[in-house]
Structures are given as C-alpha cells and as structure tokens.
Image (spheres, helix red, strand yellow):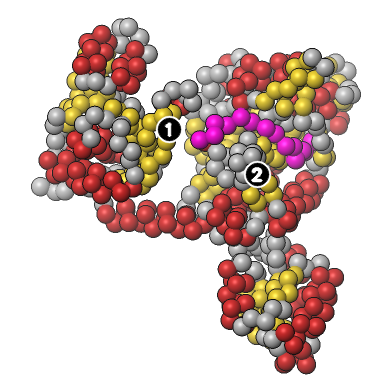
Amino acid sequence: MAKEKLNWEDEQVRHDYRHTASHIMAQAVKRLWPGTKLAIGPAIENGFYYDFDSEHKFGEEDFMKIQKEMKKIVQANYPLERFELPREEAIKYMEEAGEPYKVELIQDLPEDAVISFYKQGDFVDLCAGPHMESTGKIKAFKLMSVAGAYWRGDSDRQMLQRIYATAFPSQELLDEYIAKIEEAKNRDHRKIGREMDLFMLTEEGPGFPFFLPKGMVIRNGLETFWRQEHVKRGYEEIKTPLILNEQLWRTSGHWDHYKDNMYFTKIDDEDYAIKPMNCPGSMLVYKRKMWSYREFPIRCGELGQVHRHELSGALHGLMRVRTFTQDDAHIFMLPEQVNEEIKNVAKFCDDVYKMFGFEYHVELSTRPDDSMGTDEEWEMAENALRNAIEEMGVPFVINEGDGAFYGPKLDFHLEDSIGRTWQCGTIQLDMQMPQRFDLTYIGADGEKHRPIMIHRVIFGSIERFIGILIEHCAGKFPLWLAPVQVRLMTVTEKFAGYANELKKRLEEAGLRVEADVRNEKIGYKLREARNARVNYMCVIGEREEEAGSVSVRSSKEGELGEMSVDEFTAKLLKEIEEKKM
C-alpha cells in the first residue's frame, strides 16, 4: 500500500495536523500531572499551544518528559473519534471530568447548541475539530517554550501556563524550522539593538521605546528618505496635534469603534483623547477651506506619533509598542481619479520595498463585522481596490473580514531574508471619514460634492520598520543608514595623529566615522569592529601614513586593499547616493 503523503502547503492540513498534536500534548501532560486542568489549545501559525492550570510549574526541564509521553501516544495510534452532546449534558460531562474552563466555554454557547468532543484513547477534549484520523499520523514535534497567559486574555482572571510547540510531517522539515528559529534568535532586533546601542526598553515605560544616538541616525535617515520620496510624488507634509477633544473622536467613529485602545485625559474639565490614528486631524486640515475640483488630487503626508493601548503581554520590542510614528498620507480625490491614485500608491510601495531588498505579497482585506457604512459603499470600495491591483498584474489573496472599520484595504506583507513575513504597507479606501466630517469640494458644475479618500502607509510604523530592518539585515545596515560607516584603527598609538586628521577629513565629506587609537592589538580592534557591524574598517600604520592612504576591509566585500583617501571617500559617497543594500 502506497504511503499517504500530506499536502503540507494546504493551510487546512497544517491546521488539522497541529491541532491534533496539541491534543496529544494535552493528553501527555494530563498523564504526567493528573491534577492539571485544561483551558484551550489551538493550532497557530508555525505551531500550536495549550494553556494549562496546574500546581506544577512547567519549565523547559519538563519538555523531554512530555515529549517522551507524546511519543508513546503517537505509537499507540489512537483513532480520533468525534462525538456530540446536547449543551446541558456537555456541561455535566465536563463538570464530572473536573474541567471548569471547558464548562465556562460551553456555557457561553447558545442553549440549543450541539457540543462536539474528540476522544483519543482515555483522553477526551472539548473541540470543534477537525483533526487527523489518528495520533499515529503525527511524525515530528518539539516543545518550544513556556509562558504565562491570562484566561481569556483578561488580567483579572486566572494566570495559566502556556506551552508552545510545533509539529511537522517529517524530522527534516522540523530541523529546517528549528534552524530558522535559531537564526531568528541571532537576528532578534532587541538583542542587536542592545549590542549596537540603538534603542532601549525600560520598566518605567513598557511599550514606550527610547531611541539612542545611533538609533536616531537610522530613524532620521528613514524620515529624510520618506520626505524626499514624497516631495517627488507631489505630497505636502503636515503635522497634527497629539491630543484632540472627545467630540472629534465621536465624529470620526473612533469613540464607538476603537475606545478600548485609546488613552484619555481631561483639560479644563473636558474629555480629550491622545490620538490613536492621524486621520481625524487630516480631516480638519482639509476642512479649513473650500476646495475646487481643479486642485485634486490633494496629497497630505504626515509622520505622526500615535498612542494605542496594548496589553503588556503583547508588547514586543519595537514590533509591538504603545506609541509609534505612522508614515500616514491622505489623498483626496475625484471619483475618476481613484483607480490611478491607487496604482500610484501601490507603485510607490513597490519602489520602496524593492530598494530595501524585500519581496512581498498583497492581501485585499474586506469588511469586518464591526464597520461603518452601507453595503453599496463597501462593495464599491472593495471593487475599486481589486480592479486597480488586477490592472497592475499584481497577484493578491482575499483576507475576509480584516478591513478597517471605515473601509477595505490592500495590505502589503514583506518577506525578510529568512522567509518571515511582516505586514507593513496599507492602502485603505475610505468613504466614511469624508462623510462623517462633511468634507466637500466645488465640482465642475459649481455644486458641492463629497471627495473620496485614500488613507495609506508605506513603512507602517517607523519603529516597527526599523525593527524589521534590523532583523532583515542582521544589524548590517546599508551604508546610507549605518550609524557608524567607517572605523579607523591604528596599528599602534604612534599613528593616532594621522587617524584623527583622517577622521576629520572624512567627516567633512559627510561620513560618520569613529577612530580607534587605543593601545590594543589590531586583530582585537578588527574583531570588535566586525561585532559592531561597522561597514568599512580601515587599518592605519606606517605605510598608510607615509602614502596618505588607508587599507580597507568591507563587511560585505572583504579585503579591498590600500586606497587613497580621495578614492575611498568617492567610493563611499557613491554607495550612499545609490542607496545600495
């Protein structure tokens, strides 16, 4: 009989496989620590987890024991058998099993609901499924980490223990994944950020990162690039306030749809909010005067700092923070300009991502459950985005229900150098904000009309993009962004004078330079410079001083040999101008 082969590219297959592995892990934990109570154990991207309530404190030292028990369950090849019970019987069944978290989940379901369970050997779990046919189908798995997690994400509820794991249909695929995880650890932007002294995260401000001098070089470089590229494409820059009153946020819809993610304050006994988005401020900028159709499209860009409340457990370096700078732009258009403007923005995104060496894919995110506007408005907006991206010949997938509450969007997901994807750019077609703020223009007929608006970001968040870039480059930034572009290293202290003179000369040419004139061995200095991810390392000794030259080593090209100072300077300035990766 031919061996059955899984279609591992199929998302549903991966889900069912890892969901089954989750049940196997839960069964193993229950066998080893019988008093453990089960919460939830879903499949997630790249793996699965299970939340446990146990008197035993799980640690990585338990992983081998749990995996050994899981192997026994796999070898037993228990069939996964589904059965159903009416709601009241299901509650009683779980109460008798001593599973209070499962009881609560069932109680949240409608009274006429039929509740499904899956049984494997002596283990039963509340579950909608689906699953693999038997435990023997699971070939390779590994427990990864353990963390705390509040029951149902509520910090007032019980703290549970979450064990993360992964599973693959072969040991080879598992080994490849583990190697990728190890590489990701080496590239972790928090680790590299500390090593390079780029930014810091403090207990005094969880989710509020501090940028340090070298980090500001990168940040300022990105913001300068952003401004230059927007000027080229006909955008004008604005700046809107951080704090605006309650009425504005009621008008925009954020008060009703986004309040849980906002921060508030009182000024003169009136309620104000710290902005979570830049859009409402841009509406006020537009509304300051009456516009003519001849002035359209109007493109306003803003590097606007926003604040959004995130649970402390969700915070992650620069990737998930409570304040960040969005590179927003709002484009006000006539109906006949919509298609061309969407394509212009998509081309803008493509230009930027390709320059940084990112491949990407596009998703069309459609209407969520919690949304504003009519069915007709949403259909028109979704079709406009779909038609524009199809005309460009860009492949895309539909992401049902993941649009913003005020409009559908095209999301750009970047793929980094080790194959991970990050959502950055967004093009949203917004019919609601112009309507809610009563925005108008005078048309060719002399009458007032409502503009259509695109809301878009390219970096997404400056902070997050820096985090992605750190991991993509492993801290080895392109020369134009590098905090330290050149390090001059003397063979002995004797050549400190020439090194300092050369440092001044290179800095006057616009380069960022450090001089290491310590009385240390040159091998040690070179090793330190490599670890600091300096782009160009220049050795200075007697020959270089006499010739007025430098001996150059590139972090990317290796040994470049002896060069005149003018030749070296010209090479670097050309590389900076071309913004080579």
Position in image of residue 321 (x %, y %): 61, 39
Q: How many residues crowd mark 1 within 10 Å: few (<14), some (14–19), many (20+)?
A: some
Residue 21 place in picture, x, y as percent: 27, 39
Amino acid type at mark 2: Pro
Q: Secondary structure at mark 2?
A: loop
Q: Residues in magenta?
A: 300-313
Q: Residue at x 85, y 70 (%)?
A: 508
The residue indicated by pointer 2 is: 209
Q: Secondary structure at mark 1?
A: strand
Residue at position x 77%, y 68% in the image: 511
Residue at the spot of label 1:
149
64 over 500 or under it: above or below: above
Q: CA distance from mark 2 to mark 1?
A: 24 Å
In the picture provided, is 446 more to the left or to the right than 530? right
Q: Position of residue 337 (x, y in %)?
A: 74, 32
Q: Is residue 388 left or right of residue 113?
A: right
